[in-house]
Image (cartoon, helix red, strand yellow):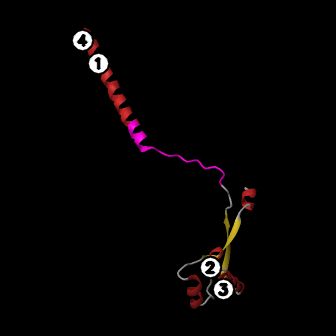
Amino acid sequence: MLPGFLNSSYDKILYPLEGLSQEDRERLFGSQESLAFSSLDLEKQAEMMRLTRKGLLKLEYQAVDQKKVKTQSWVQVNLDQIRKARNLKSCQEEIGTARIFISTSRNSSFG
């Protein structure tokens, strides 16, 4: 939706191009394929922009969502309570089976 899109900010992602020397590539990027502009200090940002203007770096923009979460729901599970409930259910099933057995036994003895 458009209003959410307008609330986004943008980060520049820098990629080395073929014309960048191997020395500069290693010095600036190291073993990384790309760098986020916001992760650089001011001196490196200025150098990266100069190299971009010279056509040695490719520049892409990446939208960063600025959505602020106003509420969060948390669910906490108490495993002991779940185990007790499972045991209680199995006990109730066993008691129910025993009641059926007792009532059928009584009925069959009168027959």
Residue that label 2 marks: 15
- Which numbered disc covers residue 21? none
Q: Which residues are magenta?
A: 69-84
Mark whose residue sits in front, 4 or 1: 1
Residue extending furthest toward the left: 109
* Residue at disc 3, secondary structure: loop
Mark whose residue sits in front, 2 or 1: 1
Q: As drawn, is 55 to the left or to the right of 84?
A: right
Residue 5 falls in image quadrant: bottom right
Residue that label 4 marks: 109
Tag 2: amino acid? Tyr
The majority secondary structure of the magenta stretch comes to: loop
Residue that label 3 marks: 56
Tag 3: amino acid? Leu
Say if the magenta span includes residue 77: yes
Give the mark, 2 or 1, whose residue is nearer the N terminus.
2
On the image, the x and y values in percent for residue 23 come to 57, 91
Say if the magenta span includes residue 33: no
Which residue sits at x=70%, y=68%?
10
| Marks 2,4: beta carbons within 8 A | no
Residue that label 1 marks: 102
Decide: is 28 above or below 8. below
How packed mark 1 is, by other alpha carbons closer than 10 Å (few <14, some 14-19, many 20 or more), is: few
Query: Disc 4 and disc 1: Cα gap in Å?
Result: 11 Å
